[in-house]
Image (spheres, helix red, strand yellow):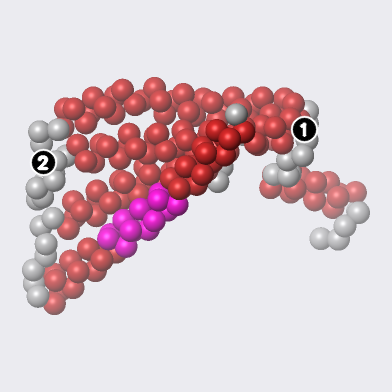
Amino acid sequence: MKKVLEVYRRIDDAVELITKYFCALLLAAMIAVCFVNTVGRYAFHHSFRAAEEIVILCAVWVTCVGASLTARADDHVTLDLLQELVKNPKVKAVLYALTRGLACAFLLLLLPAAFQMVKIYAPMKLTGTKWPQWVLYDAYVVGSIAMVLGYLRITPGRVVALWNGTEEKSEYEQINEHEKELEEGKVDA
């Protein structure tokens, strides 16, 4: 089992690295296309018809696939207020696992609809390009799967740390502790 986990981690590390470079490449493409189109429009009075679609396509892919990097860092906006207010580490661990499990379930439940959109738009082309429109909708499929993999990578370790009480305090908890210390006069403002 330990060997399987090690192989999974190596594959997942490679996926994360590929995702980072893919997003960086798409951002560079967006910048280049916008720059070339702007120069073309103002210097040569000619803009490229496909520029807007290329930028939109890249932005959608960066958003959907890049969200998995945020999931891996556990930096997505989540409703962890209840978890932050609870003092019992075991309850915190359960709430954390529940919120991440719900996020994964939501992503996976939307996948059939995403596959249906890909199927519907398969014969259509993006306006101004020769690219099929399903390329746009594939971003959600790839991004959702990558986000679920990101949550699967980070959640078990964090749940164990919360359960054992070894998790670092959140920013919210640190601010509250500092405010209490200020009120009690233990530290200066």
| Along the viewing direction, whichever of 3 and 180 lies nearer the viewer | 3
Q: Residues within 10 Å of mark 2 (few under 14, many from 20)?
A: some
Question: Residue 120: horizontal and vertical position, in percent?
Answer: 16, 27
| Along the viewing direction, whichever of 174 and 97 lies nearer the viewer | 97
Front disc: 2 or 1: 1
Task: Please give left or right for residue 79 compared with residue 181 in the image.
Answer: left
Residue occupying the far front of the picture = 3
Residue extent of the magenta highlight: 17-30
Quarter of the image where the C terminus is located: bottom right
Q: What residue is rendered at 69% in x and 29% in y?
A: 93
| Along the viewing direction, whichever of 177 and 153 lies nearer the viewer | 153
- What numbered label is drawn on residue 35? none
Q: How many marks?
A: 2
| Along the viewing direction, whichever of 53 and 166 lies nearer the viewer | 166
Task: Please give left or right for residue 169 compared with residue 76 in the image.
Answer: right
SS at circle 1: helix
137 relative to 34, above or below:
above
43 relative to 81, above or below:
below
The disc labelled 2 sits on which kind of residue? Lys
In the picture of the structure, the residue carrying the numbered disc 1 is 164
In the picture of the structure, the residue carrying the numbered disc 2 is 125
Question: Residue 140: horizontal and vertical position, in percent?
Answer: 33, 36
Can residue 85 be seen here? The reply is: no
Can residue 185 be seen here? The reply is: yes
Question: Residue 40: horizontal and vertical position, in percent?
Answer: 14, 71
